[in-house]
Image (cartoon, grey):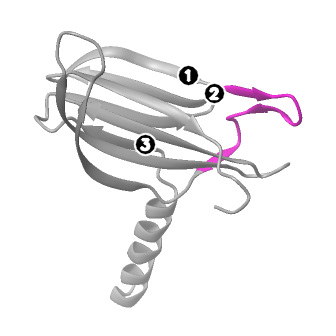
Amino acid sequence: MSATRLTILLLFLSATSAFAKSAFSVSSPDKKITFTLGKDASGVFYQVSYKGDLLVDKSHLSLSFKQGGEFGKGITFGKSSFKKMEETYNLVIGKISHVHSLSNELIVPIIENSGLKRQVNIEIRVFNDGVAFRYVIPGKDE
């Protein structure tokens, strides 16, 4: 195989793998907690580890809509976005009245390959003391 053909093949393979990403990870600001969102033949799953030790192993996610049924199989991950979050707010009740919160946020769009081609975004936040995620269904304007 010529060097040119090999270069083209390598470029094609790297471009294909970039678009076919099957897992995303985001860590806490102190790097001790890691949340991984992935997909396999069964659908979308998440894992959580603390200091490299697996705490939650492959927990599958699923949604079922009244119209269109189950969501989560035959999907593609869209372009993710990451940002560092810093929030300060006051609580009305509780032991602590002033809160300063640091986290890292990852938003991953999940898009059906066929059928209704619905999209659901998974918003993940990882703090130094825990993780949170939610489903967000984009409106028609988004």
Describe the element under mark 1 as helix, strand or loop.
strand
Residues marked 3 and 2 touching at CB (< 8 Å):
no
State left or right for residue 27 relative to residue 139: left
Mark 1 crowdedness (10 Å alpha carbons): few <14, some 14-19, many ≥20? some
Judge whether 127 appears above or below 113 on screen.
above
Q: Looking at this view, name the residue that lies furthest to the right.
A: 67
Residue closer to the observer: 91 or 8: 91
Disc nearest the viewer among 2 and 1? 1
Which residue range is magenta in the image?
A: 62-76
Residue 60 tag number: 1
Describe the element under mark 2 as helix, strand or loop.
loop
Residues marked 2 and 1 touching at CB (< 8 Å):
yes
Residue 84 tag number: none
Residue shown at 39% from the left, 73% from the top: 10
Q: Looking at this view, name the residue that lies furthest to the left.
A: 30
Describe the element under mark 3 as helix, strand or loop.
strand
Residue 127 appears at what percent x and percent y? Answer: 23, 30
Residue shown at 61% from the left, 50% from the top: 76
- Quadrant position of the C terminus in the picture: bottom right
Q: Earlier in the sequence, mark 3 or mark 1?
A: 3
Mark 3–mark 2 distance (CA, rounded to whole Å)? 14 Å
- Residue 35 located within the stretch drawn in magenta: no
Residue 68 appears at what percent x and percent y? Answer: 87, 37
Q: Amino acid at mark 3?
A: Ala
State left or right for residue 137 relative to residue 50: right
Residue 46 appears at what percent x and percent y? Answer: 45, 27
For disc 3, the marked residue is 23
Quadrant in the rendering for residue 87? top left
Residue 42 tag number: 2
Residue 6 appears at what percent x and percent y? Answer: 38, 79
Residues marked 3 and 1 touching at CB (< 8 Å):
no
